[in-house]
Each structure stands twice: as C-alpha cells, then as structure tokens.
Image (spheres, grey):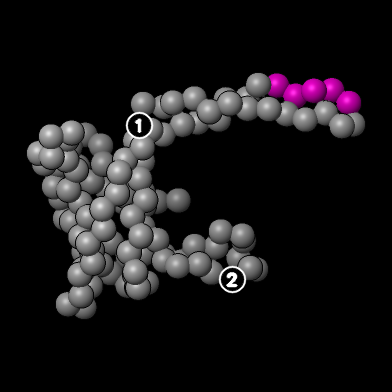
Amino acid sequence: MKTCWNGVCRTARTELRDSTTAVPQGCADGPDGACAATASPTGAKNGFADVNDLPESPVQVTLTLRDAQGESVLKQQITTTPQAVYANGPHCGKGGPQVSLVAANGRVTVARP
C-alpha cells in the first residue's frame, strides 16, 4: 500500500489474516454467572498497515493485493480523508487518524462507520 499527501509518500506492507466473528456460547446463571463466546472464521481476510504521520486531510492510497506467487490481483488508487479515532470514547482524547478500506468484487472502497 502506498499513501501520498502534499508530495510525501509512505509505503506500508501487511500480511492479510483470516477474519473471525464472535459466536455466543451462552451464559451461566446466577449472580457470578459469566458469558462465553468463541471465534469462528468468516471466510474474509483483514490486515493493518501503520502509516506514520497520516494527516486528517485528503490522501491518495494505492492498494495492491498480490496472490501467493506475488502476482498482482488488484491494484487501485482511491482518495479519502483519514479520521481521528476515539478508541476509549470521545472524553479520553483522540488517537491517530485512520482509514478503513474494503477490497471486494474487484474494487476498493472506503468503509464508513
């Protein structure tokens, strides 16, 4: 992945991993009862790329996905604006800006919360 803004470009590489979803396993009765869940594969993949100094202004992202042999299977450029995240809620200060991209059906789109 290559991310550019104001004449500066950063390249980040990531390995895609299997995505999972939580499957409820039920809850124990009583005041000390606890609930359980297990992780179940979804069939999708996910990854995270750390881009230093990402601004809260428009960036151009070129995402290239490769197969196991290193051949490009998808390459697309998209312009988007990273948004600050509040991982612990809006009263705990903002974290660094992030963008969530989705590659599906041969194209890349920006995932909106």
Query: At label 1, which amino acid type do we have?
Result: Ala
Q: Quadrant of residue 47?
A: top left
Q: How many marks?
A: 2
Determine if the magenta segment contains residue 24: no
Whether residue 48 is situated above or below residue 25 in the rendered picture: below
Principal SS element in the magenta part?
Answer: loop
If you read the primary sequence from the N terminus, does the residue marked by circle 2 or circle 1 appear first?
1
Q: Nearer the viewer, residue 69 or 81?
A: 69
In this view, which residue lies farthest toward the bottom? 6
Q: Is residue 84 left or right of residue 79?
A: right
Whether residue 94 is situated above or below residue 71 in the rendered picture: below
Q: Is residue 16 left or right of residue 105?
A: right
Determine if the magenta segment contains residue 29: yes
Numbered circle sitting on residue 93:
2
- Residue 112 rendering spot, x and y as whole percentages: 40, 51
Give, as a single range, the part of the protein colored magenta.
Answer: 26-30
Q: CA distance from mark 2 to mark 1?
A: 32 Å
Name the residue that disc number 1 marks.
44
User: Residue at the spot x=34%, y=69% of the render?
Assistant: 52
- Residue 8 rendering spot, x and y as whole percentages: 20, 75
Secondary structure of the residue carrying tag 2 is loop
